[in-house]
Image: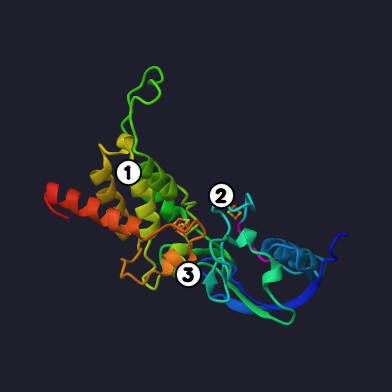
Amino acid sequence: MTRAAETITVTLEVWRQKGPGDRGRFETIRAKDISTDMSFLEMLDVVNERLALEGKEPIEFDSDCREGICGTCGAVVSGIPHGPEKAMTLCQLHMRKFSDGDTIAVEPWRARAFKVVKDLIVDRGALDSIIQAGGYVSSNTGSAPEAGSVPVPQDMAEKAMDAAACIGCGACVAACPNASAMLFVGAKVSHLALLPQGRPEAAARALAMARSMESLGFGNCSNERECEAVCPKEISISNIARLNREFFKAAFLSDGY
Ligand code: SF4
Ligand code: FES
């Protein structure tokens, strides 16, 4: 027997901002008869269809895979980046998490380095710039190496894979009171530094990425751990400690920071 979907009505307090130069404001929108089987983004799709039918501007928001893979979606839902469900992106959050009559505040990521483009969309190009500053990984060209010719201990491989799970969504920045990107940078530095293939440039990479992060307007880490709490991929702050170790090693070996 199939379960009949329940419907709820919620009140959205949505951030509306025409562009980077606009001051922006919250707008109250009633989302009536929303199936609890819908994802949060599907609920926004329904609201947008209704707004369009009324001749009003739909709410702009980012999404792509809608499967928690790409890192494109994201909004602060009632004060929590990606919403109230732990280890989950906004696209995977379902309306069954909410109750009939709830009021839900929906805002874009707030950080100096993330300019609001429109409504819930922010420019996260600064994260791409940090990656770019990290540079290349040394690898010899030629035919494929023999399998197993570069031994990688199992625990290192698993830690590297855990760090590589970062999808670059920026929720860690939005959650941090300093708008720091240390968790993101820690994950990116770690997933290469933990593997032999990424070791040759590990220290220089950490220095370049940390300098880039600072120049782009991100703050520093003060161990609040808000980043770790909201990360949809459960990236551990131990990656920040590894970033710091690589950074100080590089700063010590070079002529200072
Ligand atoms: S560390 Fe987590 S919250 Fe930060 S960008 Fe990566 S996946 Fe998103
Ligand atoms: S849309 Fe790809 S992670 Fe949410």
Report how far apart the C-alphas of labels 3 and 1 lie in the structure.
Answer: 32 Å
Residue pointed to by mark 3: 110
Determine contact: label 3, label 2, CB under 8 Å.
no
Identified at 48% across, 63% down, the residue is 171
Q: In the rendered structure, which amino acid carries the disc numbered 2?
A: Cys
Name the outermost residue toward the top: 143
Residue 60 within the segment the image draws in magenta: yes
Q: Position of residue 205 (x, y in %)?
A: 28, 45
Q: Quadrant of the C terminus?
A: bottom left
What SS does tag 2 mark? loop
Asked if labels 1 and 3 touch by Cβ distance under 8 angstroms, the answer is no
Magenta stretch, main secondary structure, is loop
Residue 253 visible in image = yes
Indicate which quadrant contains ligand 2: bottom right
Say whether disc 3 or disc 1 marks the residue closer to the N-terminus. Answer: 3
* The label number, if any, that marks residue 194 in the structure image: 1
Position of the N terminus by quadrant: bottom right
- Label 3 sits on what residue type? Arg
Q: Is residue 32 among the parts visible in the rendering?
A: no
